[in-house]
Amino acid sequence: MLKLVRLALTAAVLTAIAIRLRRRARLPERRTEPSRTPLGGSVSSARMGWVWAGIAALVALVLTLALIPRETLGVASASPTPLAGATVARGTPGVAVPTGTSGPLRPATTPQATGPVATPPAVTPAPQEGGSACAPVSRPVAVRPIDPAVRRAVNRQWRRVERWLRANAPRTYRTLAGPGRARTIAVAEAQMGVDFPDDLRASLLRHNGSRGRWAFGLGFWADGSANLGIRQIRDSWRLLCGRHSPDGWEGTWIPFLATTGSAASAPSYAVADAAGSGLLWEGADGGMAPRMPSYYALVRAVADALEQGTPLDGRRPAVVRGVLRWQAENPPRD
């Protein structure tokens, strides 16, 4: 509307200037007495009066058109009108919510809630007979906090292991991978449908597995072992869930350690039970047997064996060309 008013005023001013200039151009050089109208006014004054009256009428017409409601002129309104039998949702103007069955329905939108949205807690599926818990439950990705006391305890034991490896088995020490990411752990948990124990997550955040031919592992198999990284844990879990074993495979078993020797056709695994049964070791027959109460207990036992040279499950730590090996206490003689 303001734009129309400005255009009208501009047109009026330009028209008045043009008339004024035209009038001056027609005046003779010698000024003569203007003729008087019967009413006593000059002819030019009468003409200018009509001109200003026309300009005023033009401005009034433009203002009148600008102030007339658009609905009166037949212009469709920008916002839709709710249908009969529908109410407008509060907080969402112009969106009709049907209250009856008559008339066509308009799509209704739900107002978005403000503030943080609570994430549903992660649920670990309970193991079922036959390993059916391997079917992961759909769940959102959520980074769960770790108990600070558990993380400090795990890091303390890892520092003992690192210190010994650096001084005695440098080739094995160099196989330790860098820290993992909490987001990657959360993605693996969501894809597997299980929650990793806090001590396992704390260990992965310090060393995301191990790499290389002589990779370090918390296991003490004769053929050697390697700690699995986050993605390796997920991939091994998927593989083992589809593998048939004598005792079945439970979806709550999280593989974190695998043998690296070439003697066996398939690697053996150690798992952490998310249901709270501690750590289990895979035997020669493919069955799982309890071995340690927790992942933290395993890291501490390995650190003690390294520092003190004591046997662990019948094997002592030994270093061969900078590589850590676990040797039987009484190796067989040739």
Image (cartoon, rainbow, N blue to C red):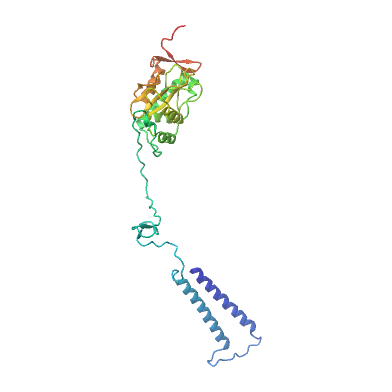
Position of 179 relative to 83 (above/below): above
The picture quadrant where one finds residue 17 is bottom right
Q: Position of residue 119 (x, y in %)?
A: 36, 42
- In this orientation, which residue lies closer to the viewer: 24 or 73? 73
Residue 15 vs residue 126: left or right? Answer: right
Position of 17 relative to 71 (above/below): below
Outermost residue, right direction? 29
The picture quadrant where one finds residue 207 is top left
Outermost residue, top direction? 334
Position of 238 relative to 288 (above/below): below
For the image, the number of numbered tags is 0
- In this orientation, which residue lies closer to the viewer: 149 or 57? 57
Q: Position of residue 10 (x, y in %)?
A: 54, 73
Q: Position of residue 157 (x, y in %)?
A: 39, 24
Q: Position of residue 112 (x, y in %)?
A: 38, 51
- In this orientation, which residue lies closer to the viewer: 60 or 27? 60
- In this orientation, which residue lies closer to the viewer: 90 or 115? 90
Image point (47%, 74%), residue name: 64
Residue 35 vs residue 146: left or right? Answer: right
Outermost residue, front direction? 102
Position of 45 relative to 9 (above/below): below
